Image (tube, helix red, strand yellow):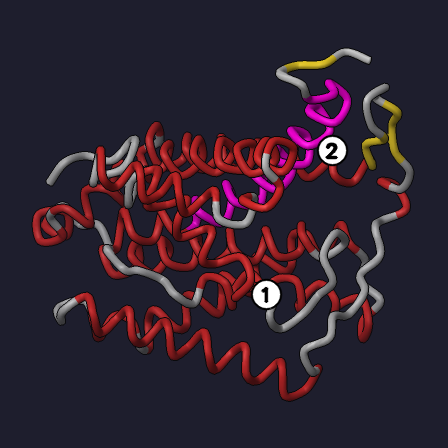
């Protein structure tokens, strides 16, 4: 059996692949946080609850309307994004000129409200959500059996991350979004509807959370606490990548997922804290994060 630093190659490659799958969820979730913070300067503590909501929308569509996974993959982000737009227009927009602490407390309270509501109706136990038949089965890679759905998660995550980066950094709409957050008065003078752009930004970030939720539903059980279980790690990913850095959120999500998988092979006891250890080291050496800009 081939060994690398005393570790069986098969076990090493298998855990790295598992880490890549986990990193796919970290990347898309942290991307939504980075979009909202980078463009609106809002620390969106409700992101985990919106991720959970996306999974529940898919579950409820299947349970009550018979709508399967593929339509739900489009409908769930739209529903969560629409809810985000309503929240931004009716509540968050009133907090922009106040201290950032107010929006942080509001989104934290919103997360507790959403999670508490679903826990009241569905309890803390998870609801199963079946893998779509077209993605059932798997592929034998030699060192492990890779379920087709998990391979799809990696591909879908990468496509969404690249598409979002291109939208924000390389399109006219993205330039308007960035300009509207830097100097809204000047942009509005050119006839651009700045409030609508801000609403779109928050709704888009929320839709990314909803997309990740429906993507995760067949792997993890749909549960009211699924958002609170992952959101702390996602915040650590954003901090390590650099608050507001789009590329940093994507790259760090995948890298920390791989680091987590590697730690499970080398020192399993530390796999639950390795992300936070890396965050502490990065903050000591580079407070702005790996890809963030110094203030």
Q: Is residue 21 magenta?
A: yes
Q: Position of residue 21 (x, y in %)?
A: 65, 38
Q: Position of residue 104 (x, y in %)?
A: 28, 69
- Mark yes or no: residue 41 visible: yes
Residue at the far top in the pictured view:
2
Q: Position of residue 65 (x, y in %)?
A: 81, 71
Q: Residue visible at 57% across and 35% down? A: 263
Q: Secondary structure at mark 2?
A: helix
- Look at mark 1 in the image and give the residue it sits on: 52
| Helix, strand or loop for the magenta stretch, by majority | helix
- Look at mark 2 in the image and give the residue it sits on: 151
Horizontal arrangement in the rendering, residue 294 relative to residue 254 (left or right): left
Q: CA distance from mark 2 to mark 1?
A: 22 Å
Q: Residue visible at 55% across and 62% down? A: 229
Tell me whether circle 2 and circle 1 mark residues in contact (CB < 8 Å). Answer: no
Q: Secondary structure at mark 1?
A: helix
Q: Which residues are magenta?
A: 7-32
The foreground one among 136 and 15 is: 15
Q: Residue visible at 77% across and 22% down? A: 10
């Amino acid at each position: 059996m081939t060994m690398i630093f005393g570790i069986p190659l098969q076990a090493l490659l298998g855990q790295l692949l598992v880490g890549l799958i986990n990193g796919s969820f970290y990347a898309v979730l942290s991307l939504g946080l980075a979009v909202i913070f980078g463009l609106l300067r809002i620390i969106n503590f409700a992101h985990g609850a919106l991720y959970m909501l996306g999974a529940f929308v898919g579950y409820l569509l299947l349970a009550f309307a018979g709508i399967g996974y593929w339509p739900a993959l489009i409908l769930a982000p739209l529903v969560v994004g629409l809810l985000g737009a309503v929240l931004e227009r009716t509540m968050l927009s009133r907090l922009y000129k106040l201290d950032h602490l107010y929006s942080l407390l509001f989104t934290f309270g919103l997360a507790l409200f959403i999670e508490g509501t679903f826990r009241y109706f569905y309890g803390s136990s998870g609801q199963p959500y079946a893998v779509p038949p077209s993605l059932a089965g798997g592929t034998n890679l030699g060192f492990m059996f890779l379920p087709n759905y998990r391979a799809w998660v990696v591909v879908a995550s990468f496509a969404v991350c690249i598409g979002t980066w291109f939208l924000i950094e390389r399109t006219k709409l993205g330039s308007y979004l960035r300009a509207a957050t830097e100097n809204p008065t000047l942009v509005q003078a050119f006839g651009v509807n700045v409030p609508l752009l801000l609403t779109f930004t928050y709704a888009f970030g929320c839709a990314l959370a909803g997309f990740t939720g429906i993507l995760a539903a067949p792997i993890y059980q749909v549960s009211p606490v699924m958002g609170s279980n992952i959101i702390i790690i996602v915040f650590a990913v954003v901090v390590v990548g650099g608050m507001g850095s789009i590329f940093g959120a994507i790259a760090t999500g995948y890298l920390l997922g791989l680091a987590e998988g590697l730690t499970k092979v080398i020192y399993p006891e530390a796999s639950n804290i390795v992300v936070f250890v890396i965050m502490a080291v990065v903050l000591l050496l580079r407070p702005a994060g790996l890809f963030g800009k110094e203030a």
